[in-house]
Amino acid sequence: MWRRRRFLRWRRVRRMTMNRLETIYQVAYLTGGPDRVTDTAVAEALERKAVRLDKSGVLHRSSAKPADPFVLAVVETLPKVRIARVREALRESEPMRSLRAELLTGGLLVPAIHWRRVRRRGSWASKAGGQALSLAREDPGLVTGVRGAVALGGLDAHPDRRSVRLLTLAPPAGARTRVAISSPDDGLTDVTDCSPG
């Protein structure tokens, strides 16, 4: 009996602590999964001028060093790639794994075994996550600016239409993808998209 009461008290405290989302990346993950988190981080990186976007839709690293772990992960995937490659790199990055674990622990995210159902339904959030998401949408301190718009509505909600067009540009049809792999002095592997366009 006392164990059940203790469990119920633990569950009530856990629900009370995780019923509010704290970061825009939690909102983005519950709204659109890892790709939406990446889109939000790219929008934030563009806004903070940590990356720049050229006329062919390729992202380039700037000299700014961001403190935000997701923006830093975006910057580290560059020097010259399209957003699709950034999404691939960030899906299993350390910040994304931490975010996913945090949302799963809080009961806000549907576990991986149910993701087929998630794709049909179009939401990554559990019932508790959906409630937290509806509260977050009305929180002006959390969902603001460009990153808030992208977190809730995807790249199509980005206010700069030119950036949206360039970020969603597909490589020219029939063009082969060329990638250069190098190993700079820091010991990490650089992958550069050398595709035309």
Image: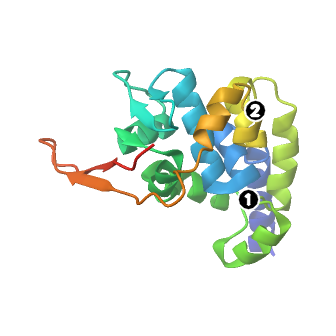
Q: Which mark is residue 149?
A: 2
Is 129 displayed left or right of 36 in the figure? right
Name which residue type carries label 2.
Ala
In the rendered image, residue 79, in percent from the top left (x then y), is placed at: 34, 38
Q: CA distance from mark 2 to mark 1?
A: 35 Å
Disc 2 vs disc 1: which is toward the camera? 2
For the residue pair 101 and 117, the one nearer the viewer reads as: 117
For the residue pair 163 and 42, the one nearer the viewer reads as: 163
Residue 70 seen in render: yes
Name which residue type carries label 1.
Trp
Q: For numbered disc 2, what is the local secondary structure?
A: helix
Q: Write the residue at 34% across / 56% down.
A: 178
Q: Write the residue at 43% across / 42% down.
A: 73
Say which residue label 1 marks: 10
Q: For numbered disc 1, what is the local secondary structure?
A: helix
Relative to 153, say whether 124 is above or below.
Answer: below
Q: Write the residue at 45% across / 40% down.
A: 74
Q: Write the residue at 77% across / 41% down.
A: 152
For the residue pair 19 and 41, the one nearer the viewer reads as: 41
The image quadrant where one finds the N terminus is bottom right
